[in-house]
Image (cartoon, rainbow, N blue to C red):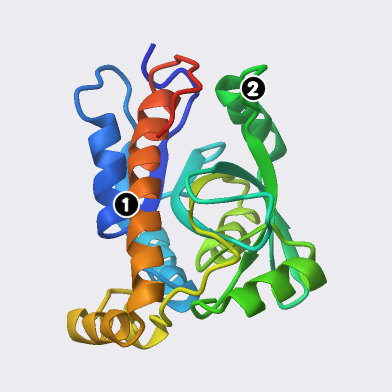
Amino acid sequence: MPNFLPIDTILVSQGAEYKAVCRGLSGMTGSIPTVLPIPVGMKPLLKYLQQSQANGKFLAAKSRVLIMGLCGSLSDRYTVGDIVLYEDCVYQGKRQECDRTFTAQLHSALSTPHSPLNLVKALTSDRVIWSAVEKRRFGETLAADVVDMEGFTALEFFNPPGVAVAMLRVVSDACHHDIPDLTPAINSDGSLRPLPLAIGLLRQPLAATHLIRGSLKALNVLEQVTNLVFSGYKSTQFS
């Protein structure tokens, strides 16, 4: 039964993550939510959401927004390809909760006795956390499991008007590997700059290999879990 949970809108980072979610929904019939690509980073996302608010999007009473995409691990408990469902996000000592009812429904729908869905606490960062040492330090000092660049901003925007938000992501890089520092490759509008991106990857070939391999695996899982959410079918087969 497509869209067996009432979800109005999916927000997912533009580019490869957006394409993976769209592939997961391809061929589905019935009530499929609108899928919108969002910019990378806290400030670009806030600007996007404010512009969308001005156009009357998102803020309908009791609407439900599912945020999907990739994230990085800050803990040995979570590795590449793991699916995680957020409980909350922290940023600079502040905390925002995901909608408890929406999150509980997703958790129940996607968990099986042999493969429970991981509930995690997330850190939102205004830059790429690329160093393995820094990842583990943040995980330990902040008691956070994963990191992204949009979650806290989205919750801070949607929670006051009562829009229900859940966040479902896939881990794309583990805490024990460095990835390239791609912060300089992110434009002020949240898009990626191809040349600085390529330079960042070439300067750190081993870290780039970890990032590329992890991203490809995570994108494949993201496509599968998107299909799972809107098929109403429970499965433990992710690869």
Say whether residue 96 is visible. yes
Up/down of 36 relative to 202, above or below: above
Q: Residue type at mark 2? A: Ser
Q: Nearer the viewer, residue 55 or 42?
A: 42
In the displayed structure image, the side of residue 23 where residue 154 appears, left or right: right
Q: Nearer the viewer, residue 42 or 161?
A: 42
- Which SS class for mark 2? helix
Q: Earlier in the sequence, mark 1 or mark 2?
A: 2
- Which SS class for mark 1? helix
Residue 216's mark? 1
Q: Determine which residue is flagged by label 2.
A: 108
Residue drawn at x 39%, y 43% as measured from the top left: 10
Numbered disc in front, either 1 or 2: 1
Residue drawn at x 35%, y 72% as measured from the top left: 208
In the displayed structure image, the side of residue 214 where residue 102 appears, left or right: right
Up/down of 184 relative to 205, above or below: below
Position of the N terminus, as image quadrant, is top left
In the displayed structure image, the side of residue 103 where residue 65 appears, left or right: left
